[in-house]
Amino acid sequence: MAKPKEIQLPQPIKKSQMSVEEAILKRRSVRSFMQKPLDWVQIGQILWAAQGITAQKWGFNFRATPSAGALYPMEIYVVSKDGLFHYLPLEHKLEVLSNSDLRVSLTQAAFNQDPISQAPVDIVICAVYRRVTGKYSSRGIRYVHIEAGHLAQNIHLQAVSLGLGSVPIGAFDDEQVKDVLSLPAEHEPLYIIPVGYPQ
């Protein structure tokens, strides 16, 4: 039987038992993870917090993180033992790109930082700069990097709210990461965020 090309994620939960203040208080970088997989509810919730649709007005699909000019230059990838996936925010789906576990190769591209291969899920945040520089010229590069920070913090706080841990990783070889994930030429990796149950 053919494997699905897309995975419909469960609807995100809009209310939790943990306040924003408590999530901020508890957030710490976690570099050691249990070998316990995340389910689609958890993965979907983290992706929604990163780039999910939060409102539809005036012909715009507003997302969970602010974006200069509502231009949304970010592309989000998920790496796990089950494969490589690309998040489709408008449909809240995952596009299945590969069924191979690429975490070890991704770790090697990130100078052998163990949390990447240890965590059950790695979120890779990429940017398509031209979406913003087309309107804001070179200043758009700064706006993209600001947006990456917003997005990453949402992931970290959502992870805490779900009883999970995460760590931001920015040290990697960009071209190797692009090669491992077979990224489109204009998708520039900015962040790798391993997520899982703290050890």
Image (cartoon, rainbow, N blue to C red):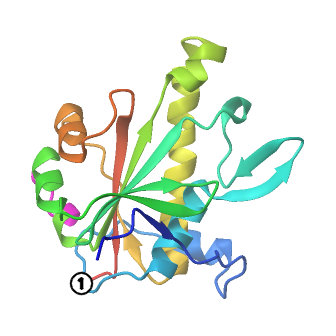
Instruction: Find numbered disc 1 in the image and state the secondary structure of the residue it sits on.
Output: loop
The outermost residue toward the top is 137
Q: Position of residue 62 (x, y in %)?
A: 75, 49
Which residues are the magenta region?
112-116
Residue at image location 30% in from the left, 44% down from the top: 170
Based on the displayed image, in which of its 4 quarters is residue 48 positioned?
bottom right
Residue at image location 82% in from the left, 52% down from the top: 56
The outermost residue toward the right is 58
Residue at image location 74% in from the left, 59% down from the top: 54
Q: Is residue 111 visible?
A: no
Whether residue 113 appears in magenta in the rendering, the answer is: yes
Q: Position of residue 172 (x, y in %)?
A: 21, 41
Residue 30 lies, with reference to residue 85, above or below; the image says below
Can you say which quadrant of the picture contains the C terminus?
Answer: bottom left
Residue placed under numbered mark 1 in the picture: 34
Residue 55 lies, with reference to residue 31, above or below; the image says above
Q: Position of residue 7 (x, y in %)?
A: 46, 69
Dominant secondary structure, magenta: loop
- Foreground: 10 or 73? 10
Which amino acid type is marked by label 1? Met
Left or right of residue 49: residue 39: left
Q: Position of residue 109 (x, y in %)?
A: 14, 45
Can you say which quadrant of the picture contains the N terminus?
Answer: bottom left
Q: Residues within 10 Å of mark 1 (few under 14, many from 20)?
A: few
Residue 197 lies, with reference to residue 69, above or below; the image says below
